[in-house]
Image (cartoon, coloured by chain):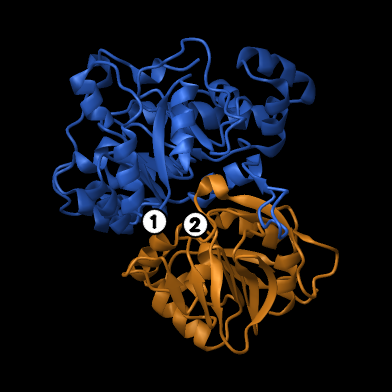
Chain colours: A orange, B blue
Amino acid sequence: MRASGAKVGVLALQGPARLHARALAELGAEPVEVRTPAHLVGVDALVIPGGESTTLSLLLDSSGVRGALEDRVADGLPVLGTCAGMIMCAAAVLGGRVDQHSLGIVDIDVRRNAFGRQRDSFEADLDVEGLPGGRFPAVFIRAPVVARVGPGVEVLAGLAEGPVLCRSGAVLVTAFHPELGGDLRLHQSFLERI
Amino acid sequence: MSEAPAPTSRPLTGTFRVKRGLAEMLEGGVVMDVVDADQAKVAEDAGAVAVMALERVPADIRRHGGVARMSDPAMIEAIKAAVTIPVMAKARIGHFAEAQVLEALGVDFIDESEVLTPADEAHHIDKWPFAVPFVCGATTLGEALRRISEGAALIRSKGEAGTGNIVEAVRHLRAITGDIRRLSVTDPTERYEWAKRLPAPVGLVTEVAEAGALPVPLFCAGGIATPADAALVMQLGARSVFVGSGIFKSGDPPRMARAIVEATTHHNDPALVAKVSRGLGEAMAGLEVSTLDTHMADRGW
């Protein structure tokens, strides 16, 4: 696997960074927690985990990570964004706060809390295009959905409400939590494109 | 759901993985007590990961006395309408009917809380049948595992709510994390005795011994009043903090709220905690634990 030894940043401002770090370490990558711009130096890729996107947006600004991250993304940094991380990667956010700014890493619009409140959160087995090994166990927690897909963005999986897994170059975004289902194939697929 | 014409997109709701998943999404964050929609907005503006809707913060419950119950549904709905982040609410220990009402209202997390007056002196709520996750307080590892055996998806240290005094939260966190460390070096044959002593189900005792951690996240609550308090308990092993009276009983709630959010994220960066602590105005007035008439942490069995 090419990704062995890759230094992968995990944004650790808020959310389950440790679960992504554990998945990456199991696959032979070297996870690095990112809380300051300095932590981004030398990383080969970045995971933006779930959490609350309103909180993440504020902490990206106050920590100075937003500017540093935008520079790295402009240079083609591979990014995996899950749930709130997908919201942060989007071009526009529907149902967000007016002061909530996404990073525009991938040309999609995303609707927050698209499936309802926590009692509507669910698990589903997804058919993922091009992923060997059968359906993927996906955990959706107050999940968003993709409301608009721009040119050049591939939809790899969807539900009745809309796309939930998209790829654009080396950027992979999921409305669900691949770190919660005990299946590391999507992390591996991300690492293989670094 | 199986009668839907199209294949349903959500065949499995309310699983333990989905319930614990929300707890995990709240890690590294601050859950703030709020008593109305305006306070909820202040909390969300400051970067809270969730709000706890209740009629009186614990400091006022202490002052006013009487029986403290689940909040008015109208007030909970107003708070739900005011923010986009998850909304939690409290039910009395053992009061499963209050919990059913909170679930029907669509709250995202139920706190079976010792801050309210207990409804049952022997039994906690059986939390497994609910689709909504529960958080419960604990003072020891045994108490934490008993709550998890009943279906809790998140454990918080109890501390002593409404005092602005961190000493009890530190005692409870150290008791829980210390016993996890001691348990994780036991021989398998010693775990039956641990199960008797805690007391807790031996299956969960074994799980903790092997993982070196609780099977659900451990947060801290009860007495956090400053950014440094948050940094302290995060370094002691809490994954997030609940702040009750500490924000809206302080001199400048929006700034205090924001400062505690920053200190929770950057708990390992003393220079940053120093920066956000500067000129915050008065923290909430605190209470010496030895002077209290009611020790809320003693509620729960």
Q: CA distance from mark 1 to mark 2?
A: 13 Å
- Is residue B236 or residue B192 the one in the foreground? B192
- Is residue A3 or residue B10 the one in the foreground? B10
Is residue A18 rendered to the left or right of residue A101?
Answer: right
Tag 2 residue: A51
> Does the image show residue B125?
yes
Query: Chain letter of disc 1?
Result: B
Q: Position of residue A148 (x, y in %)?
A: 54, 78
**Residue A65 vertical position relative to residue B191 in the rendered view, above or below:** below
Kind of residue indicated by mark 2: Gly
Residue displayed at 53% across by 14% down? B123
Outermost right residue:
A133
Residue displayed at 26% across by 39% down? B35
Tag 1 residue: B84
Is residue B239 rendered to the left or right of residue A55?
Answer: right
Residue displayed at 34% across by 51% down? B81
> Does the image show residue B270?
no
Label 1 sits on a secondary structure element that is loop
Q: Position of residue B97 (x, y in %)?
A: 47, 23
**Residue B136 vertical position relative to residue B94 in the rendered view, above or below:** below
Is residue B10 rendered to the left or right of residue B246?
Answer: right
Q: Position of residue A57 (x, y in %)?
A: 39, 67
Q: Are marks 1 and 2 on the same chain?
A: no
Query: Chain letter of disc 2?
Result: A
Q: How many marks?
A: 2
Q: Position of residue A20 (x, y in %)?
A: 62, 59
- Is residue B148 or residue A111 the one in the foreground? A111
Kind of residue indicated by mark 1: Thr
